[in-house]
Image (cartoon, rainbow, N blue to C red):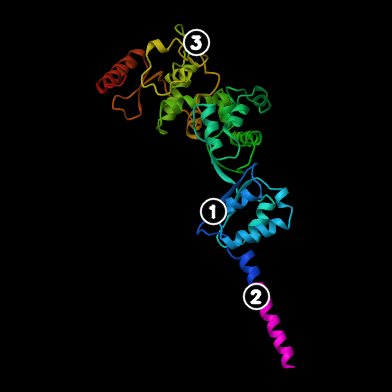
């Protein structure tokens, strides 16, 4: 009887040891950190490289458990790319299941208000597995743009500058499809109606908004600037029978791809470019940067006034003096030029 009791005690101890070891290796916290860490698995990874990446954030015993689980499954032959969270308190079994099933944690992708496709591609690639060359190639491909309802000069309109949850291993093609969905969601019935009321379509609104954004960083002033450009677009008189040119300095910078220019001299105004709004009337063929939401709303809710001219204020506040006549404008321009000269800005 006593012998049987001893056997039961030993068996119970063994079971407890096995249960404890199982819990320790497979279910106790895998993370060696106090906060969530992320492991990025790409196309080139195999089981060894995945393990190396995990070793940077995980405890040694959990790595052993992960290797055991991988060896006894098809994981090595079916590694899923993606961004995977290693949360404090989660065991190797939980994290292994997540990685085996491709249960990623999305990244927060913020669309920047940048000027060129090349710059946009570079910034996006820093947050995604796909490289900048693949993104840039897709954005410059006429067929791809056409399938999305744009061309290579307007495709940048798709990128509404907000923050989106998106999977790290999203391909360039799927990224563009996602951005098109966000574009369609942004341009809802209410915004479409407001655009129609000012005689523009969404691309025209965003093109003008990009100019407004370049003219001023002051969100409160943007509706005034938008109103001035709308006045120019609609003006028809003996002097401007085909309409008054926008004469927007930021479009000249874009045409030359010289975004560091502080002053626009007459010699720069003769560039043969569809973005030269001094030589061509109407809007340029597409945005000169990704317009901000504030810029878009400024165009849709432009201030109605009768100003036709504006010039940066001589106090360098970032705001502008507005004028109804060319004579008033030239007086403002002289004051600003004097201020530039005083500061030695060329």
Q: Mark 3 or mark 1, which is nearer the start of the sequence?
A: 1
Q: Which residues are magenta?
A: 1-19
Residue 303 can be seen in this image = no
The circle drawn on residue 56 is: 1
Secondary structure at numbered mark 3? loop
Above or below residue 95? Residue 304 is: above
Q: Work out whether 41 lies above or below 297.
A: below
Task: Answer above or below: position of 268 versus 160.
Answer: above
> Which residue in the structure is indicated by mark 2?
17
Of all residues, the one furthest to the top in this rendering is 238
Mark sitting on residue 310: none
Q: Is residue 134 left or right of residue 218?
A: right
Q: Which label lies toward us, 2 or 3?
A: 2
Q: Nearer the viewer, residue 241 or 63?
A: 63
Instruction: Measure the C-alpha gap from mark 1 to mark 3.
Output: 55 Å
Residue beneath label 3, please?
272
Residue 220: % across, % down: 41, 33
Q: Residues within 10 Å of mark 3 (few under 14, many from 20)?
A: few
Q: How far across and down, in percent of the image, does residue 42 sit?
A: 63, 43
User: Which residue is rendered at x = 51% and y = 57% of the image?
Assistant: 35
Q: How would you rate the neighbour count of disc 1 (Cα within 10 Å): few for under 14, some for 14-19, many for 20 or more?
A: some
For the point 40% across and 24% down, the residue is 260
Judging depth in this view, the residue of 161 and 35 nearest the camera is 35
Lower position in the chain sequence, tag 2 or tag 1: 2
Secondary element at tag 2 = helix
Instruction: Tell me which numbered mark, 2 or 3, is placed earlier along the sequence.
Output: 2
């Amino acid at each position: 009887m006593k012998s049987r009791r001893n056997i039961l005690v030993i068996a119970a101890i063994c079971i407890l040891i096995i249960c404890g070891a199982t819990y320790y290796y497979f279910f106790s916290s895998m993370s060696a950190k106090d906060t969530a860490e992320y492991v990025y698995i790409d196309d080139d990874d195999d089981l060894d490289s995945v393990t190396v990446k995990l070793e940077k954030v995980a405890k040694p015993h959990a790595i052993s458990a992960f290797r055991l689980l991988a060896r006894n499954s098809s994981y090595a032959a079916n590694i899923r790319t993606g961004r995977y969270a290693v949360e404090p308190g989660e065991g190797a079994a939980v994290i292994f299941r997540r990685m085996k099933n491709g249960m990623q944690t999305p990244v927060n992708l913020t669309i920047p208000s940048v000027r060129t496709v090349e710059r946009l591609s570079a910034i996006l690639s820093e947050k995604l597995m796909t490289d900048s060359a693949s993104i840039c190639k897709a954005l410059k491909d006429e067929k791809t743009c056409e399938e999305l309802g744009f061309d290579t000069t307007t495709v940048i309109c798709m990128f509404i500058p907000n923050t989106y949850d998106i999977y790290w291993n999203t391909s360039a093609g799927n990224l563009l499809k996602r951005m098109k969905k966000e574009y369609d969601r942004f341009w809802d019935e209410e915004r479409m109606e407001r655009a129609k009321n000012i005689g523009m379509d969404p691309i025209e609104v965003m093109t003008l908004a990009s100019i407004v954004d370049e003219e001023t960083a002051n969100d409160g002033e943007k509706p005034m600037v938008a109103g001035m450009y709308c006045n120019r677009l609609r003006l028809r008189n003996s002097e401007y029978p085909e309409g008054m040119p926008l004469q927007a300095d930021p479009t000249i910078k874009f045409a030359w791809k010289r975004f560091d220019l502080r002053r626009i001299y007459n010699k720069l105004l003769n560039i043969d470019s569809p973005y030269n709004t001094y030589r061509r009337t109407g809007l340029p063929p597409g945005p000169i940067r990704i317009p901000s939401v504030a810029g878009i709303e400024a165009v849709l809710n432009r201030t109605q006034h009768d100003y036709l001219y504006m010039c940066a204020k001589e106090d360098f506040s970032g705001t502008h003096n507005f004028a109804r006549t060319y004579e008033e404008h030239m007086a403002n321009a002289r004051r600003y030029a004097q201020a530039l000269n005083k500061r030695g800005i060329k």
